[in-house]
Each structure stands twice: as structure tokens, then as C-alpha cells.
Image: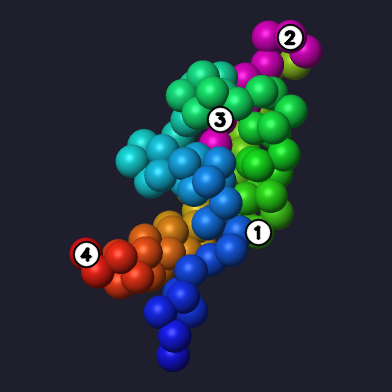
Amino acid sequence: MGVIDGLDPLIHAPKRLAAMAVLANAPTASFSFLREHLALTDSDLSKQMSALEAAGYVVAAKSGHGRGSTTTYSMTKTGKAAFTRHREALRALLGN
């Protein structure tokens, strides 16, 4: 088994890795918090979170309608396991 085998290419992308790191340290995060914290545009964040959601790593909850709606994200058990494996693989790769 090679040192990069544990790396998850979906999570490894910098924007998705940063979003997963935020969600690993909070039960939920709103779209607006992630957008501001990660300094992404609405469309870019939406694209990144959609990819994580499609993989089953995060779930989105929407409340309200129209301009007053809020979307919050939380990491799933599958996402937590994948993030943990990815983080451990990075540590092994970097020697930490």
C-alpha cells in the first residue's frame, strides 16, 4: 500500500478540504458563514458543497423560502470517516 492510498481525491481539493475542516469542528455551518470564512463566491461554494453532498459527505438543510432562506451544512458519518482517513493519510505522507 502506497503513502497516497488513503488520500481522498474529492476531499483533497483545497476548497473542499477547507469546508470539511470547518465542518469537522462544528455541528453545522451556514452557507453564508462558509462563503465568508473560505472567501468563495456563491457559485463556487455551491459547486464545492454539491460535490461533497453528492458523495454523501455532507447534508444540506434549507429553511425558509426565497431571499430569506438559509442553507446549513453538516458532516455525515460517512464524511467524518472519510475526512479522518484523509487527515491520517496526510499526516503519514508529511511525517507527522
Residue 18 located left or right of residue 67: left
Label whose residue precedes the other's in the sequence (2 or 4): 2
Which of the pair 90/86 is nearer the observer? 90
Residue linked to disc 3 = 72
When asked about the image quadrant of residue 87, the answer is bottom left
Which of the pair 47/78 is nearer the observer? 47
Residue linked to disc 2 = 67
Label whose residue precedes the other's in the sequence (3 or 4): 3
When asked about the image quadrant of residue 81, the answer is bottom left
Secondary element under disc 2, as helix, strand or loop, is: helix
8 in relation to 34, above or below: below
Residue linked to disc 4 = 96
* Residue drawn 69% across the image and 32% down it: 44
Quadrant that contains the C terminus: bottom left
Count how many numbered circles sit on residues in the image.
4
Label whose residue precedes the other's in the sequence (4 or 1): 1
Is the C-beta separation of discs 1 and 2 under 8 Å?
Answer: no
Label whose residue precedes the other's in the sequence (1 or 3): 1
Residue 33 located left or right of residue 54: left
Image location (x, y in percent) of residue 31: 58, 26
Q: Amino acid at mark 3?
A: Thr
Say whether residue 82 is visible: yes
Q: Amino acid at mark 4?
A: Asn
Q: CA distance from mark 1 to mark 3?
A: 17 Å
Quadrant that contains the N terminus: bottom left
Image: magenta residue range? 66-74
86 in relation to 25, above or below: below
Q: CA distance from mark 4 to mark 1?
A: 28 Å
Q: Residues within 10 Å of mark 2 (few under 14, many from 20)?
A: few
Q: Amino acid at mark 1?
A: Ala
